[in-house]
Image (cartoon, grey):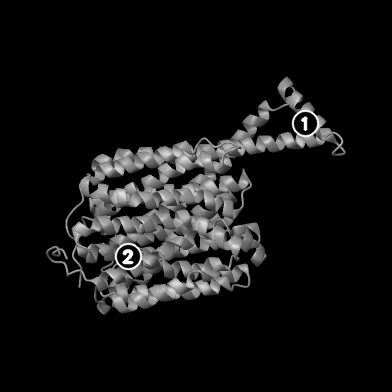
Amino acid sequence: MATPAQGMRPLTPRDIAGFFAMVVGMFMAILDIQIVSSSLSEIQAGLAASADEISWVQTSYLIAEVVMIPLSGILSRILSTRVLFTMAAAGFTLTSVACAFSGGIESMIVWRALQGFIGGAMIPTVFATSFMIFPPEKRAGVSVMMGLVATMAPTIGPTLGGYLTQHMSWHWLFLANVIPGILVTSLVWFLVDVDRPNPELRKGFDFVGLALMASFLGSLEYVVEEGPRNDWFDDEAIFTLAVVAAVSGIGFFWRVLSYRNPIVELRAFADRNFAIGSLYSFILGIGLYGSVYLQPLFLARVRGFNSLQIGTIMFVTGAFQFMSAPIAGALSKRMDLRAMLALGLILFGSGVWMNSHFTAETGFWELFLPQAVRGMSLMLCFIPINSVALGTLPPDKLKNASGLYNLMRNLGGAIGLAAINTVLTDRNALHLNRLGDNVNLARPEVQQMVDNLSQRFDGLVADPTAAAMSRLVGLVQREALILTFNDAMLLMSAVFFGALLFMPLVRRPGGPVKADH
């Protein structure tokens, strides 16, 4: 075994086994964000929910998880990593069972919120632990594994969810967590021992800061999730919660910067690499969650594919992520991480740009190359971002910083999805108007098309001309939708190419991070 870095405890097989169990727990927590995305219609039918209500199966999980992620830092210091993670894994497993047996949409939303809140503690805890127990020479390999988990889980979520729903039932989206959840809970309790609890931190625990943070992040997440669907500030609930988010946000920042024992330590952002790394984590969240949202939506709305067909197509990205992991790990040891990150951003932007050429015939093979490029790029982005953000921090800031770093990725996803939905609404209206202006009967080509369609419908329907016009309207709506999806993909690729402008600000990461054992 390699000699541990100065100031670090020796790495043991027990540490490694316990850490792998934690990684499985993190995989479950991230996977459950997207596992329901391709099966919402089946869950809606099973719970007799409305179209507006069913979106909360996903939204409630995200809102609750976003609140817990930054809170996990102070909780792990009070309880210890072992106790917090064990409680989170056990609670996540129990709430998964409760979700599976929900009798209605109201109880499902409650249990999904609890599942997201409890499971959210597992995500940043793994990142902090990796920097506490592994010496610098081993962190490249560990980053590869965590990168695979953090980026592949949302990518394969629709695939796995579609398979379980088509071959079993939607209940198994949640029951699938039970056996791995029990194993993770048991293994972490018996194997993980990386730090000691600090009960003294309970004295003066900032409940006011907690309330302000929950109000700020919860309201913000609701506004960005529901805003595009409800005409933003024209909706009374959106407007009210936007005001709540603004007021509680100001109060939250004032509180954490002035209170002696803040709920979240924002001073980690004073480290330039952490601030830039968190910004890149935010941008990666936009691409990661945005692409996993847009492509299945296109395949469902334009091509009419079912959840299993969508999942099969989406699997290409995950497969190439997996294949690129050893390549990215080797590059991270031989290549300047800043150059590696730039390469990853360029490839991701290029993959999304290639996806901006959807047509009515786009299917598996048309999407193969763009997905392959995107899958290859994710690991090239994640490993250097992780090292840039957390690799230069002192140990006393690491746990809180890990929560903030992971929060930025989720906020990037949430705000990115809000922006995407706004683009979809606005650009679809624009394209419909433009196409509608050009598709009018005064043009000979349009009249000729209507006549041809009428002849095809003659004898099949009572009014062939009306059927032809209906078909023409459907074609216009479909083409407007395709152009809209292309615009959204083009905008997302521009975000990644624009992110290259911040590269000169990044310092080369390095240096050991000691465990507070």
Q: What element carries label 1?
A: helix
Query: Callout 2 environment at 10 Å: few (<14), some (14 to 19), or many (20+)?
Result: many
Q: Position of residue 289 (x, y in %)?
A: 46, 51
Q: Where is residue 470 in the image (x, y as percent from the top left)?
A: 76, 37
Q: Which amino acid, by three-letter code, is at mark 2?
A: Val
Is residue 474 positioned above or below 97 on the image? above
Is 267 displayed left or right of 210 in the figure?
left
Mark 1 or 2, which is nearer the eye? Answer: 1
Q: Which numbered marker is on residue 453?
A: 1
Give the residue drawn at x 39%, y 76%.
Answer: 185
Q: Quadrant of the N terminus?
A: bottom left
Query: Callout 1 environment at 10 Å: few (<14), some (14 to 19), or many (20+)?
Result: some
Can residue 261 be spotted in the picture?
A: no
Which residue is farthest top? 444
Q: Quadrant of the C terminus?
A: bottom left
Give the residue drawn at x 60%, y 69%.
Answer: 106
Q: Nearer the viewer, residue 369 or 82?
A: 369
Labels in figure, total: 2
Q: What element carries label 2?
A: helix
Is 124 displayed left or right of 471 in the figure?
left
Is 177 displayed left or right of 141 in the figure?
right
Q: Which numbered marker is on residue 126?
A: 2
Q: Which of marks 1 and 2 is nearer the N terminus?
A: 2
Q: Where is residue 447 in the image (x, y as percent from the top left)?
A: 76, 24
Q: Which amino acid, by three-letter code, is at mark 1?
A: Leu
- Looking at the image, do the residues carrying marks 1 and 2 touch, with CB atoms under 8 Å apart? no
Mark 1–mark 2 Cα distance, whole angstroms, equals 60 Å
Is residue 398 positioned above or below 373 on the image? below
Can residue 187 be spotted in the picture?
A: yes
Q: Nearer the viewer, residue 82 or 12?
A: 12
Give the residue drawn at x 41%, y 47%.
Answer: 375
